Amino acid sequence: MTNTTAAMITIDDKAYALADLTEAARVHIANIQFVDAQLQQLNNEWAVCDTARMAYEAAFKRELAKA
C-alpha cells in the first residue's frame, strides 16, 4: 500500500491542500513564496553588510589606535 500525502500549505494557522485551491489561489501562493524568498535573500544581504560594516569599523579603530 502506498501512502501519499497531498501537498499542504499553512496560512494563519489554517492548512490548505494545494490540490483543492483554485488556479488563481495557487498563483497567489506562488507569489507569496517568491516574496518570502526575496525577503530572506534581502535579510541575508543585510546580515552580510552589517558584518562588513562592523569589520570596517574595527579596522578603522585599529588604525586610529596606531596614531
Image (spheres, rainbow, N blue to C red):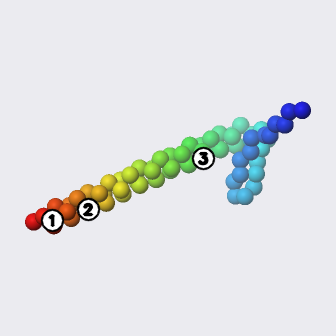
Closer to us: 28 or 49? 49
The residue labelled by disc 2 is 58
Looking at this view, name the residue that lies furthest to the right. 1
Q: Residues within 10 Å of mark 1 (few under 14, many from 20)?
A: few
Helix, strand or loop at mark 3 = helix
Cα–Cα gap, marks 2 and 1 = 10 Å
Cα–Cα gap, marks 1 and 3 = 47 Å
Residue type at mark 3 is: Ile
Q: Which residue shows up at 35% across the image and 53% down it?
A: 49
64 vs 40: above or below:
below
Q: Residues within 10 Å of mark 3 (few under 14, many from 20)?
A: few
Q: Quadrant of residue 52?
A: bottom left
Tell me the mark number nearer the camera, choosing from 1 and 3: 1
Q: Which residue shows up at 70% across the image and 58% down it?
A: 12
Residue type at mark 2 is: Ala
Closer to us: 24 or 45? 45
Q: Is residue 66 left or right of residue 53?
A: left
The residue labelled by disc 1 is 64
The residue labelled by disc 3 is 32
Q: Is residue 54 left or right of residue 41?
A: left
Q: Position of residue 21 (x, y in %)?
A: 76, 42
Residue type at mark 1 is: Leu
Cα–Cα gap, marks 2 and 3 = 39 Å
Q: Is residue 31 left or right of residue 6?
A: left
Q: Position of residue 27 (x, y in %)?
A: 65, 39
